[in-house]
Amino acid sequence: MQNESNHDPNKIYATTILCVRRNGKVAIAGDGQVSFGNTVMKNSARKVRKLYGDRIVSGFAGSAADAFTLFELFEKKVHEFGGSLSRSAVELAREWRTDRMLRRLEAMLIVADKDDSFLISGTGDVISPDDGILAIGSGGNYALAAARALYGTTPLEPSQIVKEAMRIAADICIYTNHNIIVEEISV
């Protein structure tokens, strides 16, 4: 997770992505805030997207330019491997970890399809959650805690859980706003 106390005042950050899988559906939400150091530069950035004929949903957080670069690389991997999410995630992580230029990128991705959800990091990690919930970005820990509480105590659908958990994160994290975009796929 990216810690807001480590925010470089000379970098642009795009933050807080949350993924929840439940009842044959998976939803990813992202807030719209982009920060330059301690200044909000944009309130309506779109950090979650569907890919590969709406069969994969993804979200990115971290340094904005780096996140867009990784997102584009992941999309190429998805097409290269015929929509195989797990193969695309592993190959992107391998390339990210071994390529000199890519290793310097400061961003993370969450990707999901009908079968799997993964967090992909620049250190070569490809993490699949035990409970179907993943979060990244400055407000990721807040969103993760809220989503786990809602998941364990309510019958809400994934899209409802991610919206409410992101709202809670935005109330706490100064790098997360209430302009929440949700993408959902049925599995």
Image (cartoon, rainbow, N blue to C red):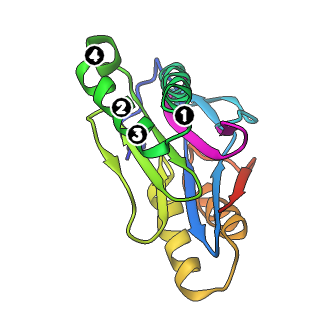
- Give the residue pinned by disc 3: 87
- Give the residue pinned by disc 2: 91
* Mark nearer the viewer, 4 or 3: 3
Q: Amino acid at mark 1?
A: Gly
Q: CA distance from mark 3 to mark 1?
A: 9 Å
**Number of other residues with Cα within 10 Å of mark 1, as a class: few under 14, some 14 to 19, many 20 or more:** few
Q: Position of residue 48 (x, y in %)?
A: 65, 41
Q: CA distance from mark 4 to mark 1?
A: 23 Å
Instruction: Judge from the rendering whether residue 127 lies leftward or rightward of residue 42; answer left or right.
Output: left
Q: Amino acid at mark 2?
A: Glu
Q: Is residue 154 above or below residue 92?
A: below
- Give the residue pinned by disc 4: 99
Q: Earlier in the sequence, mark 4 or mark 3?
A: 3
**Number of other residues with Cα within 10 Å of mark 3, as a class: few under 14, some 14 to 19, many 20 or more:** some
Q: Amino acid at mark 3?
A: Arg
Tell me what residue is drawn at x 72 percent, y 50 percent: 183
**Number of other residues with Cα within 10 Å of mark 4, as a class: few under 14, some 14 to 19, many 20 or more:** few
- SS of the residue at dot 2? helix
**Looking at the image, do the residues carrying marks 2 and 3 touch, with CB atoms under 8 Å apart?**
yes
Magenta range: 48-64
* Mark nearer the viewer, 2 or 4: 2
Res 124 quadrant in image = top left
Q: Earlier in the sequence, mark 4 or mark 1?
A: 1
* Mark nearer the viewer, 4 or 1: 1
- SS of the residue at dot 3? helix
Q: Position of residue 76 (x, y in %)?
A: 53, 23
- SS of the residue at dot 1? loop
Q: CA distance from mark 1 to mark 2?
A: 13 Å
**Looking at the image, do the residues carrying marks 1 and 2 touch, with CB atoms under 8 Å apart?**
no
Q: Amino acid at mark 4?
A: Asp
Quick one: 25 or 2, which is closer to the camera? 25
- Give the residue pinned by disc 1: 82
